[in-house]
Image (cartoon, rainbow, N blue to C red):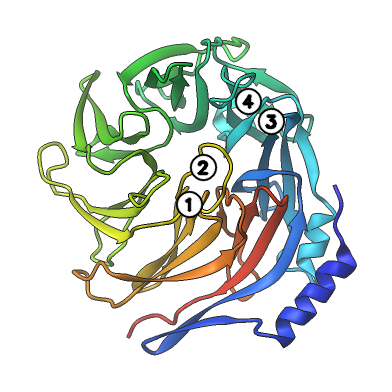
């Protein structure tokens, strides 16, 4: 790995002199994205911000390629330092070289195996990488342990911690997917039970439902554990909940296309959580959606709003589609902004709410970055001494990570 420090400094100076800030008027305030430069990392795909032992945050980077070993990197973020981006990059290091096609990286709670561990889902629908796993990785030593038995041609994207069976030990909820040579597909939502004996290497699997295959969010509804999941191959959004030890489910929407990313957040500022969802389509159906969650999750209607549609796929690689994941930038007393990783659109899309009216679901789109190459899973956080967070945008094909400082809106009066 290398960082062109002189090049980065020149970029920062040039940006400062020529339109360093991208402003957007919004009532009594403005929002700004200040480009700080970009860093070289080979094929960055998924970015995550996790706490580090010193109380700061570290940027975890998953990297993979067709004919290259998968790697997971860690970069401590020294945001209170002068020239913090360069200082942080000098501390970038590899924590794993043994996971084939690593995807999401999630912190392991200390109660499970002590401090300094992460869990990584792996594999993809490409020959040679189809059979993935769930791995526990020691950040300091790189020691890696797979905790599931390989299931031929099934790969994993993410792992979320929850005490599913109320035994006082945190378990893993995950989903896995399979795509056959003739297009036949399968998805499985399951939970993996943490054993009482910590020396037990393979954890016990429990199937929750067939269908969910990539991303999901874990929450509670009326004190029941609930999971809202995208079903990419089935092209639908589903909900699953556990009551009195039994699992039930309902289909929320089966008209949104190839469902991909999902998260829970209050989008319209009414004090109630909403669902932020993307699909992943190659044509005009590519979109970002917001769902208003009814009081009765299990039977009520989930009202859908299309907040960005017609996203064009510009990347020409096989099976390219748009968009990828979405995340929110929250502001006290105001609606959140939304950043969308375009994936095959080759862009990072910035959606700004047009008003503070909770009934107004319209946004203005601004292209924050037009890279012309695949935009992976972004990360937002790591505030500086003034409280300004940073947005990290992986430019996969060009092996760069673009970094922006975000200057937020003033609180509403």
Q: Are marks 1 and 2 in contact (CB under 8 Å)?
A: yes
The span from disc 3 to disc 2 (Cα, nearest Å) is 15 Å
**For this view, does 177 lie left or right of residue 117?**
left
- Please, what secondary structure does the residue beneath circle 2 have? loop
Q: First in sequence, mark 4 or 3: give its number.
A: 3
The span from disc 1 to disc 2 (Cα, nearest Å) is 7 Å
Residue 320's label in the rendered image is 2
Residue 136's label in the rendered image is 4
| Residue at 73% across, 41% down | 73
Disc 4 packing (10 Å; few <14; some 14–19; many ≥20): many
Q: First in sequence, mark 4 or 1: give its number.
A: 4
Residue 213's label in the rendered image is none
Q: Are marks 4 and 1 in contact (CB under 8 Å)?
A: no
Q: Which residue is mark 1?
A: 313
- Please, what secondary structure does the residue beneath circle 1 have? loop
Front tag of 4 and 2: 2
Tell me if residue 400 comes above or below residue 15 in the rendering: above
Q: Which residue is mark 3?
A: 66
The span from disc 4 to disc 2 (Cα, nearest Å) is 30 Å
């Amino acid at each position: 790995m290398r960082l062109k420090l002189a090049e980065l400094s020149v970029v920062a100076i040039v940006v400062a002199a020529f339109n360093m800030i991208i402003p957007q008027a919004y009532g009594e305030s403005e929002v700004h994205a200040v480009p700080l430069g970009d860093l070289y990392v080979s094929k960055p795909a998924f970015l995550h911000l996790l706490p580090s032992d010193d109380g700061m945050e570290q940027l975890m980077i998953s990297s993979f390629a067709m004919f290259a070993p998968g790697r997971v990197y860690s970069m401590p973020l020294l945001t209170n330092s002068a020239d913090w981006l360069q200082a942080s990059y000098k501390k970038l290091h590899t924590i794993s070289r043994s996971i084939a096609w690593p995807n999401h990286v999630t912190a392991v709670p200390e109660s499970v195996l002590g401090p300094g561990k992460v869990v990584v889902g792996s594999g993809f629908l490409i020959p040679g990488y189809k059979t993935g796993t769930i791995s526990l990785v020691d950040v300091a030593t790189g020691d890696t342990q797979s905790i599931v038995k390989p299931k031929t041609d099934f790969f994993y994207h993410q792992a979320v911690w929850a005490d599913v069976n109320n035994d006082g030990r945190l378990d893993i909820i995950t989903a896995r997917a399979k795509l056959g040579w003739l297009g036949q597909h399968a998805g499985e939502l399951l939970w993996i039970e943490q054993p009482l004996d910590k020396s037990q290497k393979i954890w016990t699997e429990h199937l929750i439902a067939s269908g969910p295959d990539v991303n999901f969010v874990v929450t509670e509804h009326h004190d029941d554990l609930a999971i809202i999941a995208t079903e990419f191959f089935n092209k639908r959004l589903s909900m699953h909940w556990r009551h009195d030890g039994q699992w039930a489910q309902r289909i929320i929407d089966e008209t949104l296309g190839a469902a991909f990313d999902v998260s829970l957040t209050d989008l319209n500022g009414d004090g109630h959580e909403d669902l932020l969802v993307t699909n992943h389509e190659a044509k005009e159906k590519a979109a970002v959606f917001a769902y208003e969650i009814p009081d009765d999750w299990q039977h009520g209607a989930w009202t859908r709003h299309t907040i960005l549609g017609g996203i064009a796929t510009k990347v020409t690689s096989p099976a390219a589609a748009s968009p990828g994941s979405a995340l929110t930038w929250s502001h006290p007393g105001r609606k959140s902004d939304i950043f969308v990783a375009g994936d095959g659109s080759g862009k990072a899309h910035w959606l700004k709410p047009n008003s503070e009216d909770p009934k107004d679901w319209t946004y203005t789109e601004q292209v924050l970055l037009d890279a012309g190459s695949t935009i992976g899973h972004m990360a937002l956080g790591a505030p500086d001494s003034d409280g300004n967070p940073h947005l990290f945008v992986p430019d996969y094909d060009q092996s760069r990570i673009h970094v922006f400082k975000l200057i937020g809106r003033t609180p509403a009066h």
